[in-house]
Amino acid sequence: MTKLSLVQQAHLAIEQVVTAGDITIDATVGNGHDTLFLATRVGPSGKVYGFDIQQQALDSAYRRLDDAGESAQVSLYHAGHEMMAMLLPPSVAGRVRAVMFNLGYLPGGDKQRTTGGSTTLAAVQASLSLLAPGGVLSLLAYTGHPGGREEAELVKAWAASLPHDLFTVSLTVPPSERGGAPEWIMVQRLK
Ligand code: SAM
């Protein structure tokens, strides 16, 4: 049996809660793989909002979405995800079914331009207030680049501190032999 990567496991988990017409957020657009996944899932009647600080990433993602014919339901912001609560339409608050974070640097881009602990924490905190009951927040945290381990530990400590009556939290860590694989933190809003 083929073992699923954590990226694939995250997609499977999100498929359980996101359906046609839903609102979702890709907090780290990068080359747009997750944005396209979400856009396909929510379909033309749904909405995907995305954030990235690099125009190069947004251009790459738009190309991917256009090629797949899935760009109409997507709005991308050239801005940090820590700004999401300020930039998104107020009407999305409490209605978002999934927020995806894929931390680290843009594959094929500048490895110095990574997500960072303090802005990531601000963004995950903002995400919680946007989630619908039953909605999920998925974070893949890579630990192999400078600052990656510290960022992963910050996010895990934040997730562990969430009130248990409002959120369930799960953590999946790859077997030690799989160097470079991310850790996966999943938070679900219960009510
Ligand atoms: N999910 C992407 C994909 O499917 O291709 C990969 C994301 S990549 C690992 C991380 C991305 O986060 C980079 O493109 C980087 O520019 C972006 N990033 C860094 N800091 C950010 C911030 N404060 N807000 C939003 N995006 C940020």
Image: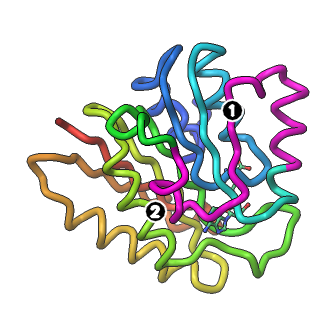
Say which quarter of the image contains residue 157: bottom left
Of helix, strand and loop, which one carries label 1? Answer: strand
Q: Residue at x 25, y 33 (%)?
A: 133
Q: Residue at x 66, y 40 (%)?
A: 34
Horizontal and vertical percent position of residue 98: 45, 37
Instruction: Point out the stretch of residues depicted in magenta.
Output: 59-88
Between residues 14 and 88, which one lies in front from this camera angle? 88
Between residues 162 and 143, which one lies in front from this camera angle? 162
Of helix, strand and loop, which one carries label 2? Answer: helix
Callout 2 amino acid? Ala
Horizontal and vertical percent position of residue 90: 42, 42
Task: Give the residue number, with chain letter if any, for mark 1.
Answer: 74
Determine whether, in the image, residue 191 is placed left or right of residue 188. left
Q: How is the image coloured?
A: rainbow
Callout 1 amino acid? Val
Can see residue 178?
no
Q: Which residue is drawn at 77% across and 28% down?
A: 71
Find out if the beta carbon at label 2 lies less than 8 Å from the nearest ligand 1 atom.
yes
Horizontal and vertical percent position of residue 174: 49, 59
Task: Give the residue number, with chain letter if any, for mark 2.
Answer: 123
Horizontal and vertical percent position of residue 130: 37, 44
